[in-house]
Each structure stands twice: as structure tokens, then as C-alpha cells.
Amino acid sequence: MDIDEILKNMTIEEKISLIVGAGLSKRVPSAAGETRSIDRLGIPSIVLSDGPAGVRISPIRIGEVGTYYATAFPNEIVLASTWNRDIVEAVGRAIGEEARDYGIDVILAPGLNMHRIPLCGRNFEYFSEDPLLAGELAAAYVRGVQSVGVGATLKHLVANEQEVNRFTINVIVSERTLREIYLRAFEIAIEKSKPWAIMAAYNKLNGKYCTQNEWLLTKVLREEWEYNGLVMTDWGAGDNPIEQIKAGIDLIMPGDEKILQSLLEAYKKGLIDEKIIDERARRVLELILKSPTYKGHRPSNKPDLDVHAKIAYEAAVEGFVLLKNNGVLPISKDAKIALFGKGSYLTIKGGLGSGDTHPRYVVSIANGLKERGIRIDEDLEKIYTSLPQFWMLRFYEWIVNEVVKGGDIKPLCSSIIEHFDSFVRSSGINVDEYLDDMVIEKAAREDDVAIITVSRVSGEGWDRSGGKGDFYLSDSELNLIKKVSDAFHKHGKKVIVLLNIPSPIEIVSWRDYVDAILVIWTPGQEAGRAVADILLGIVSPSGKLPLTWPKDLYETPAMRTYPGVPKYNPQYVVYEEDIYMGYRFYDTFAVEPAYEFGYGLSYTKFEYSNLVITREDNIIKIRLKVKNCGQYPGKEVVQVYIRSPRGKLNKPFQELKGFYKTRSLKSDEEEDVYIEIPIKYLASFNGALWIVERGEYEIRVGSSSRDIRLVGKLSIDNDICFNKRWNIVPCMD
Ligand code: BGC
């Protein structure tokens, strides 16, 4: 259909109806939204659904036999820890397929806000503190989703780094910081993946709601970046739909009659031009015309969950980060394991809120180990599995079965049922503090190794508290770690801690007690299988931290201004740390973190050699060799940091400018690594232009931001300047 023709045939009421969503989806229960159809013109409604960890729809439908489970993929923080574009793209593709098979046209993912503070309740849905890593991986995710003809949505544009007062908080941030960090991630992702949609954030940006911010939505996004996809609001964002449409929003979500009427009235009073409405309606139409629904795709409701489970496993196993290992890992398959911690049995698959998922199952750590034939201490298992949560989960399964059999469960129950599983798994009831010393002693005598899982859950709508039992261990967790370590060490046995968490916790005060620490984050439904394979050495860990792990919460630079002013019920927050966020702060001001950005151990060792750096036109070409010189097969993440010369602008000590994950290398096997870095990536924003200042740049290639193996130089003789569209322009003094 020709869009101009359609637009010509539409009444103003119809055009406005297109740019205001129709509320929650009616076609696909629990999908987050739907657009309005115009039957007269053969324009169908399309369905939008969350979210980053997989399709979030109701797993059951009242009155229908059959289930609608979706794969729970690892959260984005896990995907980011893989540093592997291919695996992230594969996850995106699988999510796209599930979406298409369940009748979803647009996925509301990936999330692309920055890890500015460890406490943000949605960090699990975001990739990193670094815009290059985040932007590149978000692009891979989007390419994956869109490769099957389903749309992806980058969200939330921009500076949505906390949940406290997320609907109204005014984020004050310098333009340089915005452009180099927070916007940069979106800019890279847009350039490399052309997402069908972008979601503007709830918060205000320098005084104006993002959804009502013409500078952001029109000047930067449309004029400078030439983005031509659709821009929607976050659900219920902002306070003025007329301003939203004028500022550059194409689709107001979830939308209601009141908004529709207010736009119509505004049009009648001459407050909005028909041309603007036409432009917005055109974008919605363009999206609809690309959608599976418009193309006549009929949902099979039968995605290949088994194949997708394998992809979820692959992504999880590559996203675990080994922080410490004094030789205990990998463990022997004959070892008998004492499994402590509620999370060993009720493993947290992901975060809560719109980024939650409803999978067929979650493989707990205990079950993952058992599947691999590992013996676990049955007495401990009995203690933990007598927790009331297990009874509740069984009750849940019963209800689901009743529904699936067509039983008479009232519709009211449906949404309770939907969230029950995640709620139960994350509920606080624990037994650690009641564990008898005798139980621990007996386990230390009889078992070969102890594993303690520490778990945390976070979610949309609230930030983590930062207190004990959250950023810090609770007294009972600390006691458990101490007691188990003492008892096992007394018997010459070792202790491993698994961190089943959505973002960092304090680690320095207790890490010396234990022998190994593995971060498994919130790894999705295949959790236990991936854990078992890493513990047994079937796969060597290859995840690297996508963020700096602080020694203490209050060393995080942004904690100085978090959550804003006033402290209780903050109205605004100033990103005072400026560009010095994450490792840019720790490296520049020589602050020692607990673990640096890019850090992660392996069971094997890699040797770097033969660094060659050349420049061709405006591309820096980096070649080197990486060799596995250890005993286990493994993958390595090669990271390229660039240190700029001292110029007019202050700059961080170094910045990530390229990365590459090798294939799995066997002992003694070598891979030629080739990384391209566009020269524009060296530019800093000086308030008007992007500038690559002349001088000698240090190219630092390593295995983490503080484990640099090879260093080379690159000279730039004259300043190079770019305008905001990245065209080279004369530099002005
Ligand atoms: C969240 C979005 C989500 C939307 C629809 C909002 O509250 O911030 O990330 O996509 O709801 O569920």
C-alpha cells in the first residue's frame, strides 16, 4: 500500500487514532500494548510486548487449553558480560522468533541506560557503564530481533539511570557528558542496527520531560542522527500529550480515550498543525506496514522452546564472571557438594517488572548439578526445600495445570498467577540463620566442597536499598560464609561462592574467607545447567565485567548525588561526576576498585603478541595474535583501550574503543585478531564539535582495563573535527 495514498484517504480523527495507543493488548494477553486499527482502510493494529529477557506475555489464557510460555533468556547484564556480539545477536533472533510466533510485532527491548550506580533497580536490564560496549551489544540484539521481521525498541532515551521518582525526576547533565556517554550508547546502536523504534524515557532531561523534549527528539535524534524509525513514549510518561507530539513523539503509549480527545481538541483549536500529525501518523503507518501482522503472518503459538533453551544456556555460560579462584575450580565430577543458600534451590532467573518473563521452568543450581550426575548433600537439600516457597510453587503448578486443563479459574486470578512464580522465588524467607552449627560441621566432614549461593532480586519501580541484606551482606549471610568457611577449611576442604545477583554487592570484606567467587548474575531459565558446566570445567569461564565493581558503595562517584535533591522525594539529580563515570572515574583518579572493568578469570591463560597498528584513511586497524597457553580450552575477550594525549579538553585516563571475543581456542591454539576502530571514536565533544586532538595516542590492548598486555602508538598530526552529524569540518580555535 502506498502511504501517501493511505494518508490522503484518512480523516483527522483516524490519523490521531493512529498516534495514540489502544491500551494493553487485547489480542495477546498481558502484552504491554497495541496500536489502533482502521478497519475501513485495512490497517490492522499491531502488538507491542516487553522485554529484554524474552517475550513477556501471560503463560496461560483463561478458558483456553494450552500454554504460552516464553524462554527466559539471561538478563542484559549477563549478555553484556559475554562481550560476544554473536551470542547476543543469537539471543535477539530467538526472542524475535518467539515474538513472531506469539503474534507480537514489536519487542520493547533492549534497554540501553547506563550502570551509573549499582543500586538502580533495573541495571539487570541494561548492559554496561560503557557506551561502546552497551551500544555495540544493543546493536547486535536489535539486528537479531529484526532479522526475523519483528521490530526492536531501544529504551529508555535517555538518562533513566534510577528508579527513585522515575516518572518525574529531572536529570541535570552536561551536554558533553550526555553526548559522550549517555546518548553515545544510543547513537552507536542506532548507527549499527537501525532499530524500528525508540522509547523515550519517563524522566526529565535538563528541565524537560524526555517525551516532551524537542532538543532530544527532533534536533538530536532526527536532525543530527537522521533517525527515521518510530519514537514512542514510555508507558504513561510525561504530562502533556500535545507537547509530546510537537516535540517529536510519534506514538503515545499505552494511550487512552482522554489523550485521544485532547489531541483532537488541540488540533481543532489550531494548537497542532495537521502537517505534524501527518508526519507522526506516517511513522506509525511505516511501522505497521513492516509488521508481521500486516504481512499476514499467523501466529503459530508454537515457538521452538527447546532450541531457544540451548541459546539461553550458551549466553548464560559465556556471561558468568569468575572473580576469584585459588585452585578449587574446576571441581571434580566425583566431588560431593554441600549446597548452601536459598538461591541454590530457588535460583533467581531475572529481575522483576516489565523485564520479567514466564518460562516453562527454571533449572535451579541444585537441579543443574544433579542433572550432570553430581552428588549433593541430601540433608541440606531437605532443609532448604522444606521452605514454604516450595509449597507455594507446587500450589502454583497445580493452578496452572488446572487452567491448562480448562479448569474453572476466575479471570481475576490470571494476573496473580502470572507473577506468582517470580514473587515466590524472590520472597525473603530464608533458613541460613537457623542452620545449626552441627549441620554445617557434618557437611564439612562428609562432603568434598561447599557452595554458597548469595542471591538478590531487584526490579522495575524501585532501587535497591544499599543497606545490609542488599548491597551489603546481611548478618546471617556473613555468618553463614564465615561458619561454612571455617568448618570446611578445618577439614582441608574448599568453599565456592556463587553470586546470583542483578548488579554488584559488597565483596571485599568477606572475599578472603572463601576460595572462589563466580558471578552468575540473573542468568535466565538455564541457570543450573550453565553453573554446573562452569563448575565442572566442561566450559571455561570467559565472561568479563561490563562494569567496575566498587570496593564500597560510596566509592561509586555517582553516589555523591544519588538519589537527588532533596534526598527524600528528590526532584532533581545532578550527574556531577560528568564524564568520569565507571572506570573513567576509577582510572583517572587512581581509585582502586574491588574488580576493574573488563575483569574476569579463566581456567586457562592467554598470551598476546605481534601487535601491529596501522591507519588507513579514517580507520585505525589493529592486528595481534592471541594464543591459549594453558591447559583448558577457552575464549578470550581482547579489549582495546585508547589513552589520548594531553590537549585542550580534559579526558579520562583511557577509554574502551574496541573489543573482540575469540573463538574457543584449544591448548596451544592461536587466533589472529583484527579490530577496526573508526578515527571518530577518538573524538571528544567540545561544546560545539567533536574533536580528535593532535598528538600521540596510546593504544592499550589487554585482557581487562588494568591488565594491559600490549601497547602501541598512533600519531595524529593535526586536529580532526566533526560536526554533530560526523561530517569532517574545519576546526575552529
Ligand atoms: C517500562 C518500560 C516498559 C513499559 C511497558 C514501563 O513502565 O518503563 O520499560 O517497556 O512499561 O511495559
Image (cartoon, rainbow, N blue to C red):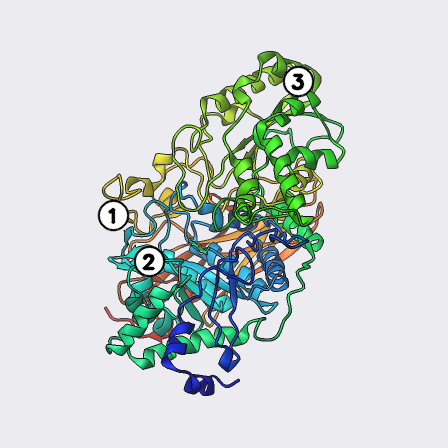
Image quadrant in which you'd find residue 604: top right
Query: What percent of the width, then of the height, locates residue 298?
Result: 64, 69
Point out the frontmost of discs 2 and 3: 3
Residue underneath mark 2? 178
At a point 37% along the width and 58% down the height, the residue shown is 236
Residue underneath mark 1? 571
Point out the frontmost of discs 3 and 1: 1
The answer for how far apart the CA atoms under marks 3 and 1 are is 52 Å
At a point 69% along the width and 40% down the height, the residue shown is 533
Query: What percent of the width, then of the height, locates residue 199?
Result: 42, 62
In this rendering, does residue 219 appear at all? no
At a point 23% along the width and 43% down the height, the residue shown is 565
| Secondary structure of the residue carrying numbered label 2 | helix
Name the amino acid, label 3: Ala
Q: Does the residue labelled 1 lie within 8 Å of ligand 1?
A: no
Name the amino acid, label 1: Gln
Relative to 69, residue 674 above or below: below
Side of 670 relative to 281 (left or right): right
Image quadrant in which you'd find residue 385: top right
Query: What percent of the width, then of the height, locates residue 10?
Result: 42, 83
Please tell me which residue lies in front, 635 or 272: 272
Residue underneath mark 3? 443
Say whether disc 2 or disc 3 marks the residue closer to the N-terminus.
Answer: 2
Q: Does the residue at mark 3 contact the one at mark 1 (Cβ under 8 Å)?
A: no
Relative to 330, residue 24 above or below: below
Point out the frontmost of discs 2 and 1: 1
| Secondary structure of the residue carrying numbered label 3 | helix
Q: Does the residue at mark 2 contact the one at mark 3 (Cβ under 8 Å)?
A: no
Side of 248 relative to 360 (left or right): left
